[in-house]
Image (spheres, rainbow, N blue to C red):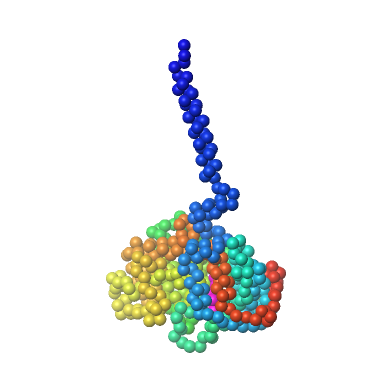
């Protein structure tokens, strides 16, 4: 008798074979083909902020607006490069993606902290060169440049800061054609409360992932010294201490530096001289809802660390631009109804200057990523109390700051390793377009790898 299920089994087997064949064929067709697989994968991936090999096109697409300070200087047109000498600033060149030092400050001229800064900057530039995209023609970065590691910008050189508006008093040295470069702390900073930028950023991220804004300390925090003063606000730090003395809403202290000599009169290790009994690790500022930012003689090198916090930065209008400062969007305390929390504010109403408002257009509570207060700090307490009464506004400002500058968990990464090397390579390209020098007057210099072995 014929098996009644025989034809059903045959049909199932045929269908099974067809399905397997189809799947094998589909996988073969859809698999990345030699020569274009990496390109397809790259198009599907989200940007990696640890990827140091982005092309110029990728850099500008990933970080729109980051290169604006470079582009603004390029639009000003050509300028001459001053001849190098042993009084500074350091002059270097790039040849075929190799960094070479043409001239440096003579031995004994720079103190240890500036030698650290000089080495860190050159490490940063070299890292940007050796990680450049293979798509880039190496000669695209070839140029000769000067690096100014002093706080004050001068001459035609790369610099840490530029004025956002003119100082109220004259007497500053002519700046010339200065291009903004990333601060040396993006490599490392010797004080033990900072260390390497990578260490600090990772520590900040750990705090931000475990400490939501509403659980942070509801105080304005600051540590610093009073001896730094700019021509814009000579009493800035002294007045900060006066306005916050004894206030429950503030944790503001002048650093109590450890002695420079031992009891027997011998000098301490230079690193120990960088320590203070009441200092905070740089990441621990992020444990507070409000972080006070004070500029020094010019800029403050701590600013970028504070910008990685999901906290509200409170600062007088920024007088000195660093390479990412143009990305801040300030809420002016003068635009807030501070009288509702402090009736005394009416008698000392702060009005920003025309220069400050031209440099920094007013943002709204829903778009700002930091807050401007009066330079004499007279409305600092009222601003903190207002933000405490409007926690959604405060948390939004803090979140927008971290979302812009941070790079973990959805941030845009404007202070990330990828953004830093992108900026350095764009700086080389922009400077190269407009700098003028006589090749016969520029030496070949010393390879960076050899120069780095010199202790002074």
Q: Where in the figure is residue 169, as x and y percent of width and height?
A: 46, 87
Identify the residue at horizontal 49%, vertical 81% (top origin): 230
Tell me where the magenta segment starts and ends, as one range: 178-183
Whether residue 179 is in magenta: the answer is yes
- Residue 294, visible in the rendered structure: yes
x and y percent of residue 339 in the render?
Answer: 29, 73
Task: Between residue 143 and residue 13, name the one nearer to us.
Answer: 13
301 relative to 24, above or below: below
Task: Tell me: 90 left or right of 194.
Answer: right
Instruction: Please say whether residue 188 is visible from this viewpoint.
Output: no
Q: Residue at x 30, y 72 (%)?
A: 337
Q: Main secondary structure of the magenta part?
A: loop
Quadrant for residue 404, please give it: bottom left
Q: Residue at x 56, y 52 (%)?
A: 36
Front-most of residues 55 and 189: 55
Q: Magenta segment: does it hold 48? A: no
């Amino acid at each position: 008798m014929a098996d009644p299920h025989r034809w059903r089994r045959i049909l199932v087997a045929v269908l099974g074979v067809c399905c397997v064949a189809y799947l094998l064929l589909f996988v073969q067709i859809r698999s990345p083909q030699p020569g274009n697989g990496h390109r397809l994968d790259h198009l599907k991936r989200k940007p990696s902020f640890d990827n140091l090999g982005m092309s110029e096109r990728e850099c500008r697409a990933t970080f729109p607006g980051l290169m604006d300070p470079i582009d603004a200087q390029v639009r000003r047109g050509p300028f001459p490069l001053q001849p190098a000498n042993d009084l500074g600033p350091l002059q270097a060149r790039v040849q075929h993606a190799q960094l070479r030092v043409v001239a440096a400050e003579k031995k004994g001229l720079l103190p240890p902290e500036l030698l650290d800064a000089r080495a860190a900057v050159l490490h940063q530039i070299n890292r940007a060169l050796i990680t450049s995209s293979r798509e880039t023609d190496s000669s695209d970065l070839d140029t000769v440049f000067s690096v100014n590691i002093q706080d004050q910008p001068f001459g035609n050189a790369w610099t840490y800061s530029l004025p956002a508006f003119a100082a109220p008093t004259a007497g500053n040295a002519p700046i010339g054609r200065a291009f903004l470069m990333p601060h040396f702390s993006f490599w490392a900073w010797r004080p033990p409360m900072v260390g390497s930028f990578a260490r600090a950023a990772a520590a900040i991220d750990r705090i931000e992932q475990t400490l939501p804004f509403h659980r942070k300390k509801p105080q304005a925090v600051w540590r610093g010294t009073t001896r730094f003063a700019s021509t814009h606000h000579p009493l800035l730090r002294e007045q900060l201490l006066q306005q916050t003395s004894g206030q429950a809403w503030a944790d503001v202290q002048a650093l109590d530096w450890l002695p420079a000599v031992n009891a027997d009169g011998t000098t301490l290790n230079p690193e120990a001289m960088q320590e203070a009994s009441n200092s905070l690790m740089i990441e621990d500022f992020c444990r507070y809802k409000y972080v006070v930012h004070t500029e020094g003689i010019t800029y403050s090198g701590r600013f970028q660390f504070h910008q990685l916090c999901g906290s509200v930065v409170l600062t007088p209008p920024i007088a000195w631009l660093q390479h990412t400062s143009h990305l801040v969007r300030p809420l002016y305390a003068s635009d807030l109804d501070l009288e509702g929390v402090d009736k005394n504010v009416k008698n000392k109403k702060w009005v920003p200057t025309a220069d400050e408002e031209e440099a920094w257009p007013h943002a709204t509570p829903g778009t700002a990523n930091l807050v401007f207060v009066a330079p004499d700090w007279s409305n600092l307490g009222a601003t903190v109390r207002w933000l405490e009464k409007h926690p959604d506004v405060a948390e939004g400002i803090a979140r927008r700051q971290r979302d812009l500058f941070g790079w973990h968990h959805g941030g845009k990464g404007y202070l990330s390793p990828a953004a830093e090397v992108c900026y350095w390579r764009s700086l080389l390209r922009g400077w190269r377009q407009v700098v003028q020098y006589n090749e016969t007057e520029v030496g070949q210099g010393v390879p960076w790898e050899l120069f780095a072995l010199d202790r002074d």
